[in-house]
Image (cartoon, rainbow, N blue to C red):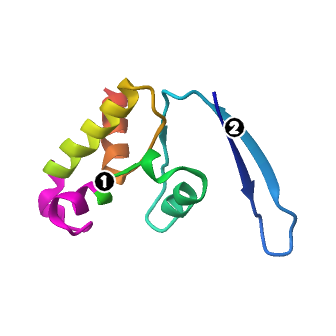
Amino acid sequence: MIEKIFNIFKRKNEQKETLKIKINPRTLVVLCGVAGSGKSTFAKKFFKRTQIVSSDHCRALISDNPANQAVSKHAFDLFYFIIEKRLLVRRLSLVFSYLFLCKFQAGYQK
């Protein structure tokens, strides 16, 4: 079990709240939210850089530009490949991608 302790601040003048979560090592954690909601900030604060799988990062690895939508197919091939390989070796993987969420919801609704 991996134990994550999150110190969450409500507002500047309020006391921080501590949340403790135990996560199995072979777990896929999905952060959902609209652009600008703090997914990246949360991920960087509470997870190792190697645990975070981001479609933007995959686009940047392929084209040197995280916003380059023209390489999305290749980026998502890499995205799913990394997730699969990490889970096969029992590594925690945290993902956030709007397209990943849409595809997941579409598959779940069928």
Circle 1 sits in a helix, a strand or a loop, which is it?
helix
Q: How many discs mark residues in the rendered view?
A: 2
Query: What percent of the width, then of the height, locates residue 13?
Result: 86, 75
Which residue type does callout 1 highlight?
Answer: Ser
Measured as percent of width and height from the top left, residue 67 is found at 25, 68
Report if residue 71 lies within the magenta region.
yes
Main SS, magenta region, reads helix
Q: Residue at x 15, y 64 (%)?
A: 63
Nearer to us in this view, 34 or 70: 70
SS class, disc 2: strand
Dot 2 amino acid type: Ile
Give the left or right position of residue 70, taking residue 36 as reference. left
**Residue 52 place in picture, x, y as percent:** 43, 49
Tell me if residue 70 is in the magenta stretch: yes
Q: Residue at x 34, y 37 (%)?
A: 83
Q: Which residue is mark 1?
A: 55
Q: Sequence order check: which comes first, mark 1 or mark 2?
A: 2
**Around disc 1, counting alpha carbons within 10 Å, would you say few (fewer than 14), some (14 to 19), or many (20 or more)?**
many
Q: Which mark is residue 21?
A: 2
Q: Is residue 13 left or right of residue 1?
A: right
